[in-house]
Image (tube, grey):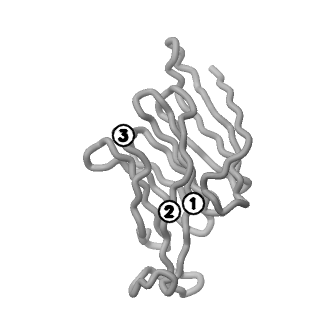
Amino acid sequence: NSTPTVSMNNSGVVVAAVQGEQGDQLFSWVGQYSTTEVQWHARRIIASPATHSSIAINDHNIVVAVYQKDVNLFWHIGKVIVSTTSELGISSPPVDPSEGNPIRLDIVWGASGAYDIGISPSVSINNDGAVVAVHTRTNLNDASVGWRVGVIDTTNSDPSSTSTTSSTSAT
């Protein structure tokens, strides 16, 4: 099983990764923070089976999730889409407190892939698209910390667009 994880950007867009009721599916939630609550908008499946996840979002609404399948680690890139009700034909959506406009948030998941062997991954992304993922390495009885560093092209509207990556580990 997995502990839920959450991340929020400076616009108050919140993403969460939550294990499904059956315990083998990993879902994402996207919502909007206000001063007293989070108005949740959409739930999407990230992967199945999957456990031990982490999720992060930057101010360009680029989302990165990392998760574990057995001892294999995977990444998944997504983008939060902000739409007005007139674009979606929704009659009673939440209201963006800064503009007073009805909005709807959704998340579109793009590229994904395996990146290492280990357990308990965690991820962070900055506004330049730099991503750092850390995990506990488990190969050859080595319980050291492993990490991956990569860059996502945040200027491209395609959530699956990635550029250079590198990796290293330390004890």
* Image quadrant in which the N terminus is located: top left
Answer whether labels 2 and 1 touch (C-beta < 8 Å): yes
Taking the view exactly as shown, the residue that stands out farthest to the top is: 140
Residue at 44% x, 85% y: name it. 89
Q: Which of 107 and 3 is in front in this view?
A: 107
Residue at 50% x, 12% y: name it. 141
Residue 162: horizontal and vertical position, in percent?
A: 68, 48
94 to 48, vertically: above or below? below
Q: Nearer the viewer, residue 56 or 34?
A: 56
Residue at 61% x, 52% y: name it. 160
Residue marked by disc 1:
79
* Amino acid type, mark 1: Lys
Answer whether labels 3 and 1 touch (C-beta < 8 Å): no
Residue at 54% x, 31% y: name it. 135
Q: Which of the numbered marks, if any, corresponds to residue 134? A: none
C-alpha separation, residue under disc 2 versus residue under disc 1: 6 Å
Q: Quadrant of residue 3?
A: top left
Residue 21: horizontal and vertical position, in percent?
A: 26, 49
70 to 21, vertically: above or below? above
Answer few, some or many: residues within 10 Å of disc 1's Cα (few below 14, many 20 plus, some between 14 and 19): many
Helix, strand or loop status at disc 2: strand
Residue 4: horizontal and vertical position, in percent?
A: 40, 48
* Image quadrant in which the C terminus is located: top right
Residue marked by disc 3:
49
* Amino acid type, mark 2: Ile
Residue 134: horizontal and vertical position, in percent?
A: 58, 34
Sequence order check, earlier mark of 3 and 1: 3
Q: Tell me: 91 left or right of 111.
A: left
Residue marked by disc 2:
107
C-alpha separation, residue under disc 3 versus residue under disc 1: 22 Å
Helix, strand or loop status at disc 1: strand
